[in-house]
Image (spheres, grey):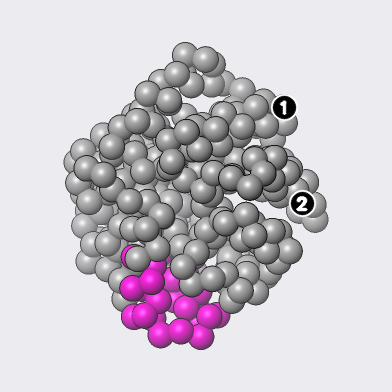
C-alpha cells in the first residue's frame, strides 16, 4: 500500500539519535511523502534542515497556537521569509487550542489570522490544529468563523488530525478544506471520525501520524513514527469500503496536488 504522512514532526528531539533509521523504516513501510511542519521559529528552521538531509521530504512553517503568545514581530518576520523557500509547501502548523490554552485565546486568534493571511498570500495551504475541551466545540466554531470571514476566497486548508463533529466536518468541506486523519481516531470521544472518514470526498482526504505523538494501536506509546501511518490509512480505507491499494494511490495523488513541489 502506498502511503503518505502529511504531518510528522521529524525535527523533534525524540528523533535526534536515530533519524536515519526512522526515515528508512518509513520508506520500507511504503511511505512515499512526508511533510515536516514547524510549530515555532526554531522548529521551522530544523524542519528545513531535515528536508535538506532527506530530499524527498517537504517542510511547512508557521506558529502553533501553543506558541502564539511567544512569537514576536521579529519571529513572525522570520516565518514570512521562510515561507518563500521552495522547500516549504504549506503554512503551519497553526490553528486554535481551547483545551490546554497554553497561549491566551486573543493571542491565538491573532496568530491564526496572520498564518491564514500568509497562506493566502503565498498560495500555500494552511495546516490547522483545532482542539476544544471535552464536550465543547468552541475552538471548532471559532475556526470556522475565521475561515468564513474570507468570504468566497478562503485560503486552502488542511484540517490536521481531525477532531470534532460531523457537522463541523461538513462545514469545513463546504469551505474547500482537506481533512487529515491521525491515530486520534482510535481514542474515546473521537467516534464521529468514522462518519467523517466515510463522507469526505476521495480527493480531499489525507492521513498522518503527528509523530512523535498520537500513536495508533500497535505503535510504541512513547514515540510514534511515520511507518505507523499505515494503521490509520487501513482504518480509513476500511471505513470507506475501498481497496487499500486504490486508497494508497489516492493518498499520494491528493498529497501531490495539495502540496506541490516547485524545486
- Coordinates of residue 248 in the picture (x, y in percent): 36, 73
Q: Secondary structure at mark 2?
A: loop
- At a point 22% along the width and 51% down the height, the residue shown is 56
**Is residue 228 among what the camera can see?**
no
Chain part drawn in magenta = 229-252
**Is residue 244 among what the camera can see?**
yes
Q: Residue 171 sits in which quadrant?
A: bottom right
Judge whether residue 64 is colored magenta. no
Q: Nearer the viewer, residue 148 or 65?
A: 148
Residue picked out by circle 1: 106
- At a point 29% along the width and 63% down the height, the residue shown is 31
Q: CA distance from mark 2 to mark 1?
A: 17 Å
Image height check: is 136 above or below 60? below
- At a point 45% along the width and 18% down the height, the residue shown is 77
Image height check: is 243 above or below 136? below
Image height check: is 44 above or below 246? above
Quick check: 198 left or right of 149?
Answer: left
Amino acid at each position: 500500500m502506498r502511503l503518505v504522512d502529511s504531518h510528522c514532526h521529524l525535527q523533534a528531539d525524540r528523533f535526534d539519535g536515530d533519524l536515519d533509521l526512522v526515515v528508512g523504516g518509513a520508506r520500507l513501510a511504503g511511505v512515499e511523502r512526508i511533510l515536516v511542519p514547524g510549530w515555532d521559529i526554531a522548529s521551522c528552521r530544523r524542519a528545513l534542515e531535515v528536508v535538506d538531509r532527506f530530499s524527498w521530504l517537504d517542510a511547512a512553517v508557521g506558529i502553533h497556537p501553543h506558541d502564539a503568545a511567544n512569537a514576536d514581530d521579529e519571529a513572525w518576520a522570520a516565518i514570512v521569509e521562510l515561507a518563500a523557500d521552495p522547500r516549504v509547501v504549506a503554512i503551519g502548523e497553526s490553528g486554535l487550542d481551547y483545551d490546554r490554552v497554553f497561549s491566551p485565546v486573543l493571542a491565538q486568534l491573532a496568530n491564526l489570522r496572520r498564518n491564514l493571511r500568509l497562506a493566502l498570500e503565498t498560495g500555500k495551504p494552511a495546516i490547522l490544529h483545532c482542539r476544544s475541551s471535552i464536550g465543547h466545540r468552541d475552538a471548532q466554531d471559532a475556526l470556522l468563523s475565521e475561515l468564513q470571514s474570507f468570504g468566497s476566497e478562503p485560503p486552502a486548508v488542511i484540517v490536521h488530525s481531525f477532531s470534532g463533529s460531523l457537522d463541523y466536518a461538513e462545514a469545513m468541506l463546504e469551505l474547500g478544506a482537506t481533512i487529515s486523519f491521525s491515530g486520534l481516531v482510535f481514542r474515546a470521544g473521537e467516534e464521529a471520525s468514522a462518519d467523517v472518514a466515510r463522507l469526505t470526498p476521495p480527493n480531499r482526504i489525507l492521513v498522518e501520524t503527528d509523530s512523535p505523538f498520537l500513536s495508533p494501536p500497535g505503535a510504541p506509546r512513547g514515540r510514534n513514527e511515520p511507518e505507523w501511518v499505515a494503521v490509520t490509512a487501513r482504518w480509513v480505507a476500511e471505513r470507506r469500503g475501498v481497496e487499500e491499494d486504490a486508497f494508497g494511490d489516492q493518498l499520494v495523488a491528493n498529497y501531490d496536488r495539495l502540496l506541490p513541489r516547485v524545486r
